[in-house]
Amino acid sequence: MLPLASDTRLPRYQQLRDHLLAQIANNRWHPGEAIPTEAALATEFDLSVGTVRKAIDALVAEGVLERQQGRGTFIRRPQFQSSLFRFFRFEAVNGERVVPMSRILGMNVVAAPSAVAQALGLAPAADVIHLQRLRLLDAQPVLAEDIWLPRQPFKLLLETDLDSKGPLLYPIYEQVCGQVVAAAEETLTAEAVDQVHGRLLQVPAGSPIVVIERLARDYAGKPLEWRRSRGHAQHFRYRIDIR
């Protein structure tokens, strides 16, 4: 039997849920990997299978785990790239969706601006890594991104050639730093582009652009990344199914 790191006033299934979530966040199991069976977990924690099942059910409902018929229960790997196409239409000539190429313009350690420190839950002016990235479609800039990361968990990125590892950052966070993005919150606004980002996007200052702010978290809810993406209004789209 292992002690459950949780508030002992909570029901046992809730304590187990909290304990399993902490272990997932600490990479005991990796995204896409199966967790032990309910019977094995019941033995490990000296709990009934019914109690274990309630804890697993809670994590499935929260989207942390997913059950696969006949195979077991797995750590769910979120698919964040779909959000790019929810707000922007990036297509090849034949109409096929394409992921814009990525070009890192700069990566520096800076003192966190107040909004960044607040979003990431850091002390004022704490060290953060600031990434500036341009996304291109057919060699034309379509997104300009400012990305901030807590320095300590992501310090290995400072020694990494990000452009050589492809256009998606979250797999790089996982492979290089062991940091897994499990969920994110996005806010969408519109604004007139300033001169700096107008030059990056190759549009006149004052042109309308769409701004998406994203706060990404790990499985335990800890903030990992805050980014602001500015995109051409001509590529913007919004779709929702109402039933």
Image (cartoon, rainbow, N blue to C red):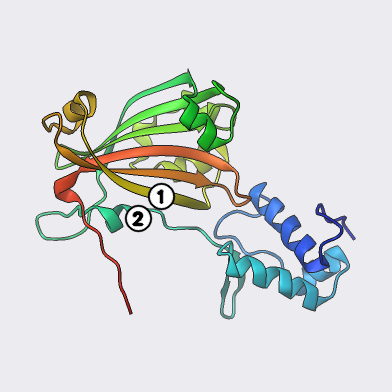
Q: Quarter of the image for the N terminus: give it.
A: bottom right
Q: Residues within 10 Å of mark 2 (few under 14, many from 20)?
A: few
Q: Is residue 169 left or right of residue 42?
A: left
Q: Secondary structure at mark 2?
A: helix
Residue nearer the viewer, 202 or 72:
202
Q: Residues within 10 Å of mark 1 (few under 14, many from 20)?
A: few
Image coordinates for residue 55, horizontal then vertical, percent: 72, 68
- Discs 2/1, front: 1
Q: Secondary structure at mark 1?
A: strand
Residue 97 in view in this figure: yes
The residue drawn where x is 42% and y is 58% is: 79
Residue 37 in view in this figure: no
Circle 1: residue type: Glu
Q: Is residue 149 left or right of residue 145?
A: right
The residue drawn where x is 55% and y is 26% is: 151
Q: Is residue 142 above or below residue 11?
A: above
Image coordinates for residue 236, horizontal then vertical, percent: 20, 51
Circle 2: residue type: Ser
Q: Quadrant of residue 63?
A: bottom right
Q: Is residue 230 above or below residue 128?
A: below
Image coordinates for residue 153, horizontal then vertical, percent: 58, 32
Q: Is residue 96 above or below residue 193?
A: below
The residue tagged 2 is: 83
The residue tagged 1 is: 186
Image coordinates for residue 4, horizontal then vertical, percent: 83, 56
Q: Are marks 2 and 1 in contact (CB under 8 Å)?
A: yes
**Which label's residue is closer to the chain start, 2 or 1?**
2
Q: Quarter of the image for the C terminus: give it.
A: bottom left
Residue nearer the viewer, 124 or 203:
124
